[in-house]
Amino acid sequence: MNTIHNRPLSRRTALRGLGATIALPWLEAMAPRSLASGSTVRHPVRMAFLYVPNGVQMSQWTPRAEGERFELPPTLAPLANLRHDINVLSGLAALQGRPFSDGGNHAPAMGAFLTGVHPQKILRCGISADQLAASRIGHLTRLPSLEMSCNRSGRPTCDGYPCVVSSTMSWRSPTQPIPAEGSPRAIFDRLFASQANDRERNATRRSILDTVRDEASALHNQVSTEDRHRVDEYLTSIRDIEQRIARVEALPAPRLPAGAARPEERIPASLADYARLLGDLMALAFQTDVTRICSFVIDSEGSNRSYPEIGINSAHHDLSHHNNRDDMVRSILRIEHHHVTQLAYILQRLKDIREGEGTLLDNCMIAYGCALGDGNRHDHFDLPIILAGKGGGSIRTGRHIRYPQNTPLTNLWLAMLDRAGAATPRLGDSTGLLNGLS
């Protein structure tokens, strides 16, 4: 690599302008000169938790064979090009999500997913895996963690609980849930801009890139040709997200019925556009090391969202109680396939970002799933769980791993926390580190 300066760039190098701070992705120029002889750089390990509601049809989710020779069942077919980047995990359970004497399956399922603790209706649960990680390693990044959600409908199934329980994965403490942010613009600004100066930039409709153009030009003179390409691709992806947000906000406002209030911000109409936009923001946050921890609610537990974009006008939660009616089963399978299609997009986005000699996905642990197994029966065992990414080389992917029935899901969280540098001896109902991932 040929650069003008002999000293490497700091990993925390950022482009700064009028109220904006744009962290940079990893560049060759950030590698210590002592590694130029061929040694490898240790990149930070990122972790994300993606939640989908209402369980799945397990017969169309679970591979028949174990180990490396499994075939993807129909619901997981969108992951065909990522088969060697994922593990399908069977046998895990979120037993603290059962209703017990409190009634309801959905709200306690969401509350127990990352905590391993049965939530109480007085708004008490437990610390979640992502927030435990934030308390241990969050000081290493600009944001300790990022909490996002595609649910802006306000229609979760609350089961008599405060509705925040069925729409929130993250708990900073047993009495402090962290509501997820659903505004793409607010997330973007949190990652890259100061709030005060963002108003000035919006007033002139300038791109955030305009404010850092001079520093970006100067950086080009300090790095190799390959690094210039990395920076250009990264800045282009930022501009693409800005344009997508602007297109949504520029759509004509629909005529509202009398008495209805205008939404405070436009969001994409379809779940696919919404999830992909937030997924791209998560990828940027990980690429720039703004944060290493993300929780992402694709939809709240018990959601009754419909999916007209794929021809499903019935409500998701209602369809999950199909009682084996063929037409309802066909509809629920299309919804579950649609969800996995969005996961495939997000994982491919991470895989397309080069980081050192590998990819950003290689240095991630992306857990996707639900705290309900079979949605029709409302099981809380044999959950649909996918773990994607190699965790910085600590996870062997491309397998279907079956664990003994009722193995706590929190054992997986312990294993992920350990690999992310946030080890803890116990979380909720955990019984030890989940084995078999290496």
Image (cartoon, rainbow, N blue to C red):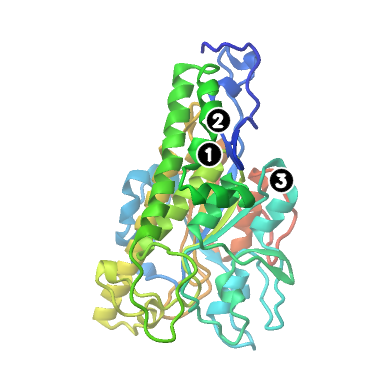
Who's the residue at 33% across and 76% down the image? 255
Instruction: For residue 9, say whether it is visible.
Output: yes
Residue labelled with disc 3? 137
Is the C-beta separation of discs 1 and 2 under 8 Å?
yes
Residue labelled with disc 2? 26
Is the C-beta separation of discs 3 and 1 under 8 Å?
no
Instruction: Tell me which amino acid carries mark 3.
Output: Ile
Who's the residue at 37% across and 71% down the image? 57
Q: Secondary structure at mark 2?
A: loop
Dot 1 or dot 2: first in sequence order is 2
Instruction: Tell me which amino acid carries mark 2.
Output: Trp
Who's the residue at 57% across and 44% down the image? 192
Who's the residue at 38% across and 51% down the image? 244
Instruction: Tell me which amino acid carries mark 1.
Output: Gln
Q: Secondary structure at mark 1?
A: helix
Q: Secondary structure at mark 3?
A: helix
Q: Is residue 19 left or right of residue 232?
A: right
Q: Disc 3 and disc 2: Cα gap in Å?
A: 19 Å
Question: Where residue 329 sits in the image (x, y, percent)?
Answer: 29, 76
Dot 3 or dot 1: first in sequence order is 3
Question: Where residue 243 sits in the image (x, y, percent)?
Answer: 39, 48
Compared to residue 51, the image places residue 119 above or below, namely below
Tag shown at residue 413: none
Residue labelled with disc 1? 287
Between label 3 and label 2, give the one nearer the viewer.
2
